[in-house]
Amino acid sequence: MEMTQYLLVALVCVNLAYLAVTRLITLTRITAVQGLLLAAMPLAVLGPDPHSHALILSLGVFAIKAIGFPWLLARTLSRLSGDPVVEPYLGFNLSLLSGVAGLLFSLWLETRLPFPPGLFPPLLFPAALTSIFSGLALVVARRKAITQVIGYLAADNGIFLLGVPLAQGSVWLELSVLLDVFVAVFVMGIALHHINKTFESIDVGRFCSLRD
Amino acid sequence: MLTVLPLVPLLAGLLALALPADGPRRALLVLAGLIHLALTLACFVHPPAPAYGGLLELDALGQLFLTLASLLFVAASCYAVGYLGHEGAGPRRDFQDGAAFVNAPERVFTMCLLLFLAAMTVVCATRNLSVLWVGIEATTLSSAPLIYFHRHRRSLEATWKYLVICSVGIALALLGNILFSVAFYDPASPLTSMGLTEMLPRAAGAAHPWLRAAFIFLLVGYGSKMGLAPMHNWLPDAHSQSPSLVSAMLSGALLNCAFLGILRAQQLLVAAGMGDFGGELLVLFGLVSMGTAAVFIVGQGDYKRLLAYSSVEHMGILALGVGIGGGATFGAMLHAVNHSLTKGALFLISGNILALYHTRSCYDARGLSRALPVTAALWTAGFLAIVGSPPFGIFVSELTILKAMLAGGHGFAATFYMVALAVIFIGMATPVCRMIQGPLPPAVPHPGREQLLSVVPPLLLLAATLVLGLYIPEAVTGLLERAAAAVSLGG
């Protein structure tokens, strides 16, 4: 099996781990692992090129997704009050089961979709789709606002993975997208800090004052 | 010219953060808005060359929405001078739950307003899907602190919803961009950029299933930001909790920017010969948005939420117009102009009402004609304009869309459209009439103070939509026709 395949299998495992983890600090560490695996993807998929685009992109992803995001999340987490556990709306077992169902569905979908030949390495599409699915599941099926941020990141990582084989043009635009998402997480971190201070909790279940 | 256009608000924003005194900072806000508007209008006289290696490029569609954003910004910044002077610093008490809160520092607020304009400028002045995405995400990030200007629970809740829903939505739009790349994938001659200049001539050879998937993701993604139902949940909360001048910018300019993202995708579909697919989806989302707005407008007790749901309705009309195609596309472009001007004015007026009555309840803010005579007159005129009464511009644009629907044999859509408009007319008339008439609450000073800066900007915006209802200048018609042609012909 090639290096790309090992990385993709590891990414699928990480995606499922998002849904099974019970502690917030472990969740932030998983984002670091996913960032690290994603940083290796441009080099593994695109290979060396004369303009070193893949290398620049890998370094950018490493700096932002493997170091920047986990650092921001850990910093935010350290400032929050309350028990640092993930509080689910949907139980962990059911979440994991739905994650596996999502994986099976994406494996099936990979065989049905008319992909351009040679564009996506095997397993890349299911790995990306499972990441998007896990991310969205964290956004809607967990109570704490910080898990929504992590879910957003996981979904964004899946979308990024899908774009890796296509990232052969201007690498600066890819980096702008990364920077935008970094600022988004930074702004969400500030908002989380205010939520924690104002509501004395980051439970989104308390957001019930704005209704028709 | 395009090189300078986004830099003006960007640099002014950074300068605003550094300026210690309130007076010069407020003057800078207005000045930056006026320079931006002057540069935008200069683009009509001297069409600008593409800048930054083709990443920024202004076409008729972009020019239309850029002019609207710039005009709205000037009106909102003039209003902001009076508003910020009235707000002041220091702890305040929330009129709804009595809790103490403070406002965000004025320099941060001013900086974010200017950065917001810079981000919208990038969105309008590009034909590159990746740059457009970066710009739209930047509009979310720069406008979130604006919604949280009043630092209390409700605005924080609204800001969080806005951040999460729009960020996830925009992430889906990024997936749409990637799927467009897949559709255009050709190892023999790969795309060098995501610019429409390169993509449109090659659209006919793109893979149709991937184009469909890409459009759906872009529609859902940017549709969340545009406030199309059922992805509109953030909109009433954010609009009702923001300062009114921010609500005016969100509704009058930001929603258009997200709409522009959808129009760019529709341009690609039309060029690929799949305009009908995009059109049908736009009609569906348009009708659902109008229906949802009608349901929530009837019996709505909060006048800012009422205006917000009215925005959902009008975004639905825009989607419907473009989806129907033909003459309705021109109608939709005209409608975008009229809606921006009218809704911008209405939100600014709602700020005057809120400042005097300290309530957003239509039941408690009564006797407006006696408390604030000029504001009451503008509120009435704005109501008549937004529900599509003649002689205001929205009447003309709504009629244009209806005529195109009937001419195209879209009987069901036309019937639904008329019923929704009628329900919304009644639903809005009841609270507006209640607010204008009735007894004055004892605690409200009589008559209240009406500053020039709080009534002139909405007055000018309403005057503009009145003019557009009576006579559309040739230059405006030309711009609207070119914008409509770009969408319906995929140019």
Image (cartoon, grey):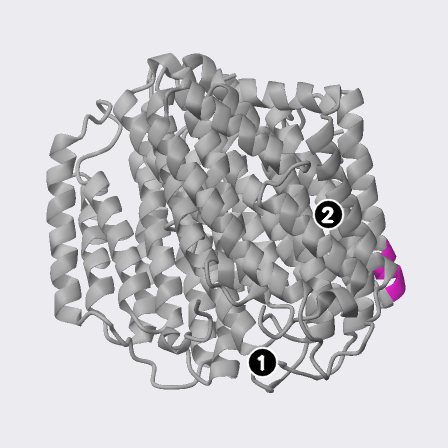
The part of the image, by quadrant, that contains residue A118 is top left
Pointer 1 local density, CA inside 10 Å: few below 14, some 14–19, many at least 20: few
**Distance (Cα) linking label 1 and label 2:** 29 Å
Span of residues in magenta: B23-27
Q: Which mark is residue B311?
A: none
Q: Residue B26 magenta-drawn?
A: yes
Marked residue chain, label 1:
B
Pointer 2 local density, CA inside 10 Å: few below 14, some 14–19, many at least 20: many
Q: Which residue is mark 2?
A: B73
Marked residue chain, label 2:
B
Q: Is B92 above or below relative to B6?
A: below
Q: Quadrant of the C terminus of chain A?
A: bottom left
Residue B317: percent from left, percent from top = 48, 38
SS at badge 1: loop
The part of the image, by quadrant, that contains residue B47 is top right
Q: Please identify the residue farthest to the front as the structure is shown.
A: B438
Q: Residue at x 48, y 80 (%)?
A: A196
Q: Quadrant of the N terminus of chain A?
A: top left
Question: Depth check: A2 or B274 in front?
Answer: B274
Q: Which residue is mark 1?
A: B96
Q: Residue B349 magenta-drawn?
A: no
